Amino acid sequence: MRKLTLAIVGLVALIATSVAVAHGIEGAKTTKAVKGTFSAAAGSVTTRSCTTSDNKTVVITDGKYTGASAGDADLTGPITLRVRSVVNSTDKVGTLSGSFNIDASGKDTRGAFSAVYDNGNVAGLAAARAHESKTSLLANVSAAFSATTGFTNGKIGGGTSGGSAVEVGPGSCKPSSPQSEKSEARGTVSAISTTSITVAGLTCTIPADKSADVNAKVKQGDRAEIKCSVVNGQNTLVRVEKKR
């Protein structure tokens, strides 16, 4: 949370500086349009989730994303983004905030951004300082974004997409608890192979690493007890015991 707060504070400070320059007459500076494109793949990513009081799943991800930026001189070079995304994955909306660094020729262009996430796309505002040209940058940014894979089709100025708006409320969250689906049966082994076993009408997939052991332990026609659990959508054998 501290990193996120500092990123937002930095963004506000950079925007305030730009506004101050715009209102000043003495020392007024020239302006020009610049643009760039970027993509960045996920590096180190940590994710956690919780369930809100209105039964929505919120996914919080802190990640480092690296790639390349191209365009005007201050926007060309390797790019690194450090991002926190907070996404309501039930409704597919949320927010992103973070910092970025473009290793431009000479010295880096460094800044912060804040954006809205909507169904796999982000759009927002970035503010930065380009140290080589000693200029400030205030830009609309947009990209396709996945917390687990990164940014694609990113734009800094130059035709960025418009963004949506989200309402952030005070609803509380509780940690998500995984649901476990289990089943068991006792009776005659009516079918068995290297990949599955059926007892008393219950069929379960046999994991590859347990196949030889299970087939050595029980045969078709034996009486047995099996216990299974749903793994990746399949009823999967957890335990088998031969009965007399």
Image (cartoon, grey):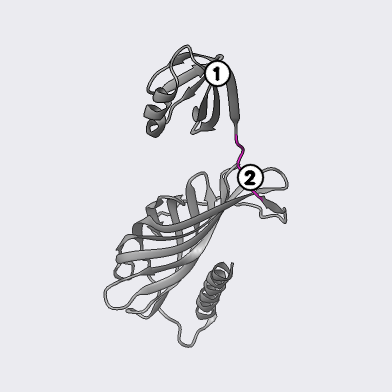
* In-front residue for pair 82/213: 213
Residues at circles 1 and 2 in contact by the CB criterion of under 8 Å: no
* In-front residue for pair 158/6: 6
Report the residue at 48% width, 46% height from top.
120
| Disc 1/disc 2 C-alpha distance (Å) | 39 Å
The part of the image, by quadrant, that contains residue 37 is bottom left
**Is residue 124 shown to the viewer in this render?**
yes
Q: From this viewpoint, which residue is outermost toward the front?
A: 244
Label 2 crowd (10 A; few <14 / some 14-19 / many >=20): few
Report the residue at 49% width, 52% height from top.
122
Q: From this viewpoint, which residue is outermost toward the left?
A: 105
Residue designated by label 1: 244
Q: Position of residue 81 (x, y in %)?
A: 42, 63
Q: Tell how many labels.
A: 2
**Residue 179 lies within the magenta run:** yes
The part of the image, by quadrant, that contains residue 64 is bottom left
Question: Tag 2's secondary structure?
Answer: loop
Question: Quick check: 232 above or below 15?
Answer: above
Q: Position of residue 230 (x, y in %)?
A: 54, 31
Residue depth check, mark 1 versus mark 2: number of the one nearer the observer: 1
Question: Quick check: 122 above or below 196?
Answer: below
Report the residue at 45% width, 87% height from top.
27
Q: Which residues are magenta?
A: 175-180
Q: Position of residue 183 (x, y in %)?
A: 59, 26
Quarter the C terminus occupies: top right
Amino acid carrying mark 2 in the image: Ser
What is the chief secondary structure element of the magenta stretch? loop
Label 1 crowd (10 A; few <14 / some 14-19 / many >=20): few
Report the residue at 72% width, 56% height from top.
170
Residue designated by label 2: 177
Determine which of the numbered discs, if any, sits on residue 158 in the image: none
